[in-house]
Amino acid sequence: MIEYPYDSLHVVRTPEGFYRVDPIPSEEELAEYYKEEYYKKNHANYKQEYTEEKIESFINKIKKRIWVLKNIFPFEPTTCLDVACGEGWGLRAFGDEGWDVTGLDFSTDACVVHNPEYAEKIITGNLYDTLDDLAGRGEKYQVLNLDNVLEHVSDPYRLLAGCRGVIEQSGVMVIEIPNSDSKHWEYLFNRGVIEWRFACMAYPDHLSYFGIDSLRNICDLYGFQEAAIVDLMSYDLRINGRPAHMDDYLDTCSFKKVLKYFASMADLGLGGEIVGYWGVKYADTEN
């Protein structure tokens, strides 16, 4: 088991503006952690069992992401590669929408527990090596889904390089990350409200801490072009003590206005999670 007390955790700022834990655990340590600890025991970010309400919230969050994706990039359902697919919620949500799905992860253990019908869709092994192998075989995917992955891996540069090698020229990469460098968290930290400068401080789960600008910088480095960055979290707005059904109301509004609202929330740094949608900037031969 990897252990590192928070009071001695050291982070360094990268040229792209995000922060990384120093030192980074080895690939062998991380592989053992996720195989033997993270997915086989109840964990802060993972449980062996979920309520039906919690499962519905997982699926609805991904469907909201797909809704934005389809409105920005109008195309027929096609192939989706879910990178570090974990429990398989993304495979299930994209599969329900008609996509031909493939997952990548260290193991199928978590998916077998929660979405066993999709376990056979997963290619197991080291993410970097698997992406390189797929690229070497000429495999390409219309959509790449990275749901809270980039902050977990030891080398986000190598991961994005691998993703660049398997995306269609007309494809889309969707990245969801904790907005660790949000202005709201900075405001709270400077006033002593919170102990940690970064949102979602969680070692060894989170090895890198991104904000909107640093996410833009690292994606640009590998030839991805920003289409939108939004905050898609639900907000528990209540009127007279009763739910105001914000999401239901937003579904009745024009997509352009709703997208502008979500993008403004992300830019203000009020959300703990941000989702970026990225097209491909140039052809492989020009990269």
Image (cartoon, grey):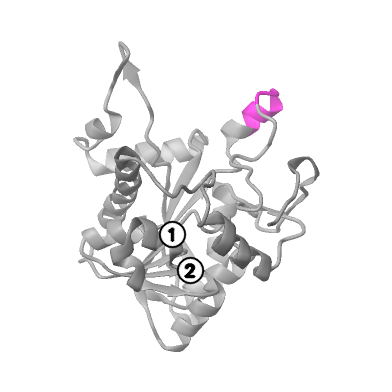
Q: Mark 2 sits on what residue?
A: 107
Q: Residue furthest bottom?
A: 137
Q: Residue furthest top?
A: 240
**What kind of residue is marked 2?**
Ser
The amino acid pointed to by label 1 is Ala
Percent across and percent down for residue 178 are 53, 46
Residue range highlighted in magenta: 186-193
Is 192 magenta? The answer is yes
Q: Which mark is residue 282?
A: none
Residue 151 position in % (x across, y down): 58, 55
As drawn, which residue projects farthest toward the right?
Answer: 8
Q: Residue at x 47, y 40 (%)?
A: 266
Q: Secondary structure at mark 2?
A: loop
| SS state under label 1 | helix
The residue lying at 47 percent from left, 64 percent from top is 84
Q: On screen, 67 above or below 283?
A: above
Q: Are marks 2 and 1 in contact (CB under 8 Å)?
A: yes
Please give the name of the residue rendered at 20% of the width and 64% of the height, measured from the top-left corner.
98
Residue 136 left/right relative to 190: left
Choose top left, top right, bottom left or bottom right for residue 144: bottom left
